[in-house]
Amino acid sequence: MVEISFLTEPDRARWEVLARGKDAYFDVERGADSYERTWRRVLDDERIRGIAARLDGRIVGIAHYLFHAGVWYSDKCYLADLFVDEEVRRRGVATALIEWVARDAEQHGAPGLYWNTLEDAPARALYDKVGRFHQGFVLYTYRRDANRTPARS
């Protein structure tokens, strides 16, 4: 049975193994300071939360999420990271993590849970079962151009 709980200080080493595994999967490189900063945020920032999924007492999955204000409706909850050890995938760990986040979000007045993923991510099979795909939505992120002069207001 999967057990879910908030991350605590003794979880640091295993958390970092899984966080680095997530980054390797998405081909992201980070320095040690980024992991330390995120770890501190997960433990100390009231808006950002980190949870661990355990099987037989061993952490096999992690999730990070945060609450933020909604403009038109109630507050929202953004599932920023979800990663499960490859050895235990397809055993309900990711589903348990998502369901935990959804319950926590609702209990804290943020029933709108959402996340992003890559178009070709294998996890979409699960996401299509537990979530609602919004056909036609496109994600943009701002691209800073070092040579561009900022607009003046």
Image (cartoon, helix red, strand yellow):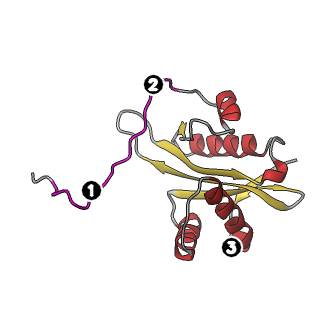
> Up-down: is 109 above or below 7?
above
Q: Secondary structure at mark 3?
A: helix
Magenta span covers which residues?
134-150
Residue at image location 68% in from the left, 73% down from the top: 9
Q: Residue at x 15, y 58 (%)?
A: 149
Label drawn at residue 145: 1
Q: Amino acid at mark 2?
A: Gly
Secondary structure mostly taken by the magenta-highlighted segment of the chain: loop
Amino acid type of the residue tagged 3 in the rendering: Glu
Q: Which disc number belongs to residue 109?
A: none
Front: mark 3 or 1: 1
Disc assigned to residue 136: 2
Residue type, label 1: Asp
Q: Earlier in the sequence, mark 2 or mark 3?
A: 3
Assign a secondary structure to mark 1. Answer: loop
Does the stretch in magenta take in 144? yes
* Mark 2: few/some/many CA within 10 Å (<14, 14-19, 20+): few
Left or right relative to 27: residue 152? left
Q: Farthest residue toward the left?
A: 153
Query: In the rendering, which numbered label is found on residue 9?
Result: 3
Asked if 147 appears above or below 68 in the picture, the reply is: below
Sooner in the amino-acid sequence: mark 3 or mark 1: 3
